[in-house]
Each structure stands twice: as structure tokens, then as C-alpha cells.
């Protein structure tokens, strides 16, 4: 009798397995399970697709209305804390976007277990309005008329908690602590589900530091920025430690992300804060869709592929998943070639990129729809 039962169960097992729903790529519950899925994608030659402001929280709090250009709902999407916090932007704008981001994060998680890839373009405390859309106070404003030149090295002031006579505070460290506390409160109160459980997310901290336009940018020969690599590392660690203190229950994956201006492993890791405090490696690369300073499209292919292979090798050695966190086609005439080159990068045998995120307002609907349908792309299925 027992033998008969065993035989029947053995015969039924394939039918049972076939009937089970396919395991989804967004079966995560916390940061570790997100990391597991990202690493799984890398090992299987798959890549999650994301887009910044996929849900346009600057204009609507209705996630269905911003279903994003006939693409459907993604498993990952990009947002920015900058527009919903701080005192640089008009109060009404900040309050509206705080509400919209909160609704977006909660609805995207509830409806589709989708997670945000978060940036934070924190404004420079001494910022004055510039010609960069009049709103991006994060840019290195000491090149703008009215910026106090004695306060160019802001990170050094924060690390040393320098006493200041502006900003309505006594010490600059107090200002920075208040900025982190505000974001931490946002995370504690809004990045939670209906049961009060934290919603996991990727936090791309102090990104593109290899350029001068952020006030946390590394020192360069043109003297436009003033941050040493060691100060950057200390600032990164200070920031993470503050978040761990003020929102200890948050499910955060920390992402290290220079811009594309590196040619060696040493240059890429120059400001790397350490394995113990970084979960995901990344880099931004707008050159994938731009032939500026290059002789041909073929040269472009070689340059961007070489860079992807370089960082993939670093990620493999450090046992970290890899993301292209910002990229987009900057030239209309390259919109078809851009997606072809991106696909060549993602499917190259020596490249292992787990996430790719389109940025900027340059958006090519038909090409993007076709791109996310590739078998190696994980979008919403």
C-alpha cells in the first residue's frame, strides 16, 4: 500500500510543480531578500529595469494616472528625497511632493511589491539660486555670485562641526544632523506598509562624487571642488551611522555610485567607504547615449563596454551586485543605437549588471517598450 502511495505521489509531483505559479522576481520582504534577488539576477544574466520618476510624484499622487507611458508597473522605480524635504524649495512644493512620494511608495509596494531606488540631492547649506533650473541647491554653488567663498569645503565643516554665523544655527554639524533627522522621520513614518512594517529600498548615497557639481564632489585639478577622498569616506560613514541611529528599523541597501570619470579600479575605489557599509556598487554613465569627444559610434561601443567590464570585475571581486544608476540617450539620432548598445553591455559575458536605471527627461517610448521586453530584462514579470 505504501509503495502504491509513493508511486502515485511521484507521478503527481510534476503536475503539481507545473501548476505552481512561477516565482516572481519581486518576492522580497526586507533588504536582505531584495539583495538576494538582485544577486540571483546577476548570476542568471538578468537585469532589473528602473526609471527615475517613473511615477511622476511632482505632479500627481495617483499611481494609476502615472502608469508610465504604457509600460505597466515596474518592480523598481526611482525617486529623490531632495524634493520632499529641506528648506531650500518653496514650502508648498516640498509639502506636496512629500505627500506624493509617500503615496507612491506605499501604493507601489501594496499593489506590486515594487521598491524605490532613492537618491538624495541634498542642497548645499550656503546655496544660492543658480541657473540650474533655479531649484538645484545641491550644485556646487561657490561658482555662483553671492556664494560665501569661505564656506567652500562644506564636508570639512560638517566633520569638524564648525561654528558658523549663518543659517540660523550655531554649528554646521547641527544643520546636517537636522537634515538627516528629517529624512529619517520620513522613512520611519512613510516607508512602511499597512501593518507598519518597513518597506525596503536602495539608498544611493552621495553619488557622482567624481564630478565637481555636487558639494560632496572630490577635489579636481580645476579646483572647482574641495573634498578629499578620506573626508568623503568619513562623511559617508557619518551619514550611514546617523541613519542607523535615527531609523534603526529601516530596511536600507546602501549604494556607492561614482560618475563614469574613472579608468582604473584604483580610481573607481578612490572614495570607497568600505565593504562593511556598502551593499551595492554602481556608476552613472550618460556616455552610453552620447558620442561627444568620440570619433564614432564604434568607438563609443568600445569605451562604454570596457568601463562596464572594469566595474563588473571589481564587483565580482568584492562580491557585490552592480547597477548602472543613471543613464539616458542625450541625442535624438542615437535613440535606437543607445538601446542596442545598452543591451550589448548587459548581455556581454564579462559584464554582470543587476539593475539599470534610465534618468533624465529624454525618453523614447517605443524603444523603451521594446527594450524591457527582452528576455534578460526584469521589469514586471
Image (spheres, rainbow, N blue to C red):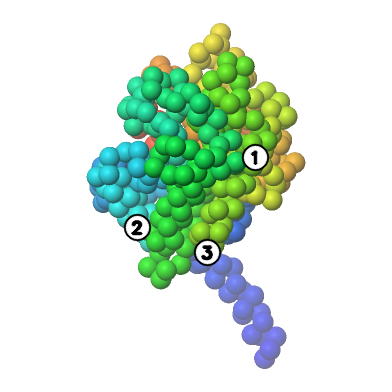
Q: Which residue is mark 1?
A: 233
Report x, y in % for residue 237.
62, 46
Report x, y in % for residue 98.
33, 50
Residue lying furthest bottom in this view? 1
Q: Badge 1: few (under 14), some or many (20 or more) residues near its Cα, within 10 Å?
A: some
Residue 380 appears in the picture as rendered? no
Residue lying furthest top in this view? 295
Residue lying furthest right in this view? 317
The answer for how far apart the CA atoms under marks 3 and 2 are is 20 Å
Residue 74, above or below 211:
below
Marking on residue 65 = none
Q: Looking at the picture, tell me which residue is in the foreground, 242 or 272.
A: 242
Q: Which residue is mark 3?
A: 249
| Residue at point 55%, 59% (across, down) | 245
Q: Secondary structure at mark 3?
A: loop
Report x, y in % for residue 91.
27, 44
The answer for how far apart the CA atoms under marks 1 and 2 are is 35 Å
Q: Which residue is mark 2?
A: 107
Q: Badge 3: few (under 14), some or many (20 or more) residues near its Cα, within 10 Å?
A: few
- For residue 107, which quarter of the picture? bottom left
Image quadrant containing the N terminus = bottom right
Residue 86 appears in the picture as rendered? yes
| Residue at point 64%, 75% (across, down) | 10
Which sits earlier in the primary sequence, circle 1 or circle 3?
1
Q: Looking at the picture, tell me which residue is in the foreground, 270 or 26.
A: 270
Question: Position of 63 compared to 121: left or right?
Answer: left
The answer for how far apart the CA atoms under marks 1 and 3 are is 24 Å
> Closer to the camera: disc 1 or disc 3?
1
Amino acid at each position: 500500500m505504501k509503495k502504491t502511495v509513493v508511486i502515485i505521489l511521484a507521478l503527481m509531483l510534476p503536475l503539481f510543480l507545473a501548476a505552481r505559479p512561477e516565482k516572481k522576481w519581486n518576492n522580497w520582504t526586507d533588504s536582505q531578500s531584495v539583495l538576494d534577488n538582485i544577486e540571483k539576477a546577476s548570476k542568471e544574466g538578468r537585469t532589473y529595469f528602473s526609471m527615475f520618476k517613473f511615477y511622476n510624484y511632482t505632479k500627481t499622487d495617483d499611481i494609476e494616472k502615472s502608469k508610465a507611458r504604457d509600460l505597466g508597473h515596474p518592480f523598481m522605480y526611482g525617486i529623490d528625497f531632495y524634493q520632499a524635504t529641506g528648506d531650500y524649495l518653496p514650502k508648498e512644493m516640498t509639502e506636496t511632493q512629500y505627500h506624493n512620494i509617500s503615496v507612491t511608495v506605499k501604493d507601489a509596494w501594496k499593489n506590486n511589491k515594487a521598491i524605490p531606488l532613492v537618491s538624495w540631492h541634498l542642497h548645499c547649506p550656503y546655496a544660492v539660486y543658480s541657473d540650474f533650473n533655479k531649484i538645484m541647491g545641491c550644485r556646487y554653488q561657490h561658482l555662483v555670485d553671492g556664494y560665501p567663498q569661505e564656506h567652500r569645503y562644506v564636508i570639512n565643516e560638517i566633520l569638524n562641526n564648525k561654528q558658523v554665523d549663518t543659517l540660523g544655527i550655531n554649528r554646521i554639524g547641527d544643520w546636517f544632523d537636522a537634515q538627516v533627522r528629517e529624512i529619517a522621520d520620513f522613512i520611519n513614518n512613510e516607508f512602511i506598509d499597512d501593518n507598519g512594517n518597513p518597506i525596503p529600498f536602495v539608498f544611493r548615497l552621495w553619488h557622482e562624487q567624481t564630478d565637481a557639481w555636487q558639494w560632496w564632489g572630490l577635489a579636481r585639478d580645476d579646483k572647482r571642488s574641495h573634498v578629499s577622498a578620506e573626508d568623503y569616506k568619513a562623511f559617508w560613514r557619518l551619514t550611514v551611522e546617523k541613519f542607523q541611529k535615527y531609523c534603526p528599523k529601516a530596511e536600507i541597501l546602501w549604494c556607492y555610485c561614482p560618475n563614469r570619470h574613472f579608468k582604473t579600479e584604483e580610481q573607481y575605489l578612490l572614495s570607497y567607504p568600505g565593504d562593511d557599509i556598502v551593499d551595492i556598487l554602481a556608476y552613472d554613465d550618460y556616455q552610453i547615449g552620447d558620442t561627444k569627444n568620440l570619433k564614432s559610434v564604434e568607438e563609443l561601443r568600445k569605451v562604454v563596454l570596457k568601463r562596464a567590464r572594469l566595474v563588473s570585475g571589481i564587483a565580482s571581486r568584492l562580491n557585490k551586485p552592480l547597477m548602472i544608476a543613471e543613464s539616458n540617450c542625450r541625442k535624438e539620432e542615437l535613440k535606437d543605437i543607445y538601446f542596442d548598445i545598452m543591451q550589448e553591455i548587459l548581455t556581454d559575458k564579462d559584464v554582470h549588471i543587476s539593475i539599470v536605471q534610465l534618468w533624465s527627461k529624454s525618453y523614447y517610448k517605443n524603444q523603451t517598450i521594446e527594450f524591457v521586453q527582452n528576455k534578460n530584462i526584469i521589469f514586471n514579470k
